[in-house]
Image (cartoon, rainbow, N blue to C red):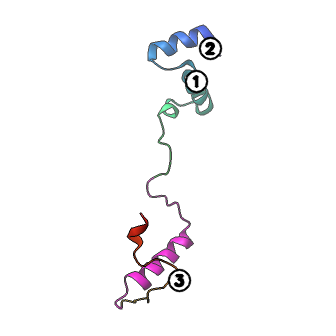
């Protein structure tokens, strides 16, 4: 293993924190290839959905059946008792 003084000196040379240098060394020792040091993007990978496939199918079906159908469905307005007629007065 690299000594602390050596790690701090080398980290300063490349402009990183010594902890980063130790992580790089650990990653290199684990995989034994320099390509293991290439930074990897965090977060969700493009093309990988966050919703399970069965839920995706349900959502697509609802969109097709209700929002993209040829017939438009109108729903009657719902009256809530006690709701003031002029809501703008409340602000």
Quadrant in the rendering for residue 67: bottom left
Q: For the point 56% across and 18% down, which residue is it?
A: 18
Mark closer to the observer (2, 3): 3
Residue 37 location (% of width, % of height): 50, 31
Disc 2: CA contacts within 10 A as few (<14), some (14-19) or many (>=20): few
Q: For the point 58% across and 27% down, which residue is it?
A: 23
Mark closer to the observer (1, 3): 3
What residue is pinned by disc 3? 81
Disc 3: CA contacts within 10 A as few (<14), some (14-19) or many (>=20): few
Q: Please tell me whether mark 1 sits on a helix, a strand or a loop.
A: helix
Residue 4 location (% of width, % of height): 62, 11
Locate the C terminus and report the quarter of the image it occupies: bottom left
Contact? badges 2 and 1 (CB < 8 Å) = yes
Q: Nearer the viewer, residue 73 or 78?
A: 78
Q: Please tell me whether mark 2 sits on a helix, a strand or a loop.
A: loop
Boundaries of the magenta span: 46-71
What residue is pinned by disc 1? 25
Check if residue 55 falls in the magenta segment.
yes
């Amino acid at each position: 293993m690299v000594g602390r003084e050596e790690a701090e000196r080398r980290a300063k040379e490349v402009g990183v924190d010594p902890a980063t240098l130790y992580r790089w060394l650990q990653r290199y020792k684990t995989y034994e290839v320099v390509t293991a040091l290439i930074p990897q993007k965090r977060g969700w990978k493009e093309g990988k959905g966050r919703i399970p496939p069965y839920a995706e199918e349900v959502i697509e079906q609802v969109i097709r059946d209700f929002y993209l159908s040829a017939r438009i469905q109108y729903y009657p307005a719902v009256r809530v008792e006690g709701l003031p007629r002029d809501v703008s007065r409340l602000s």
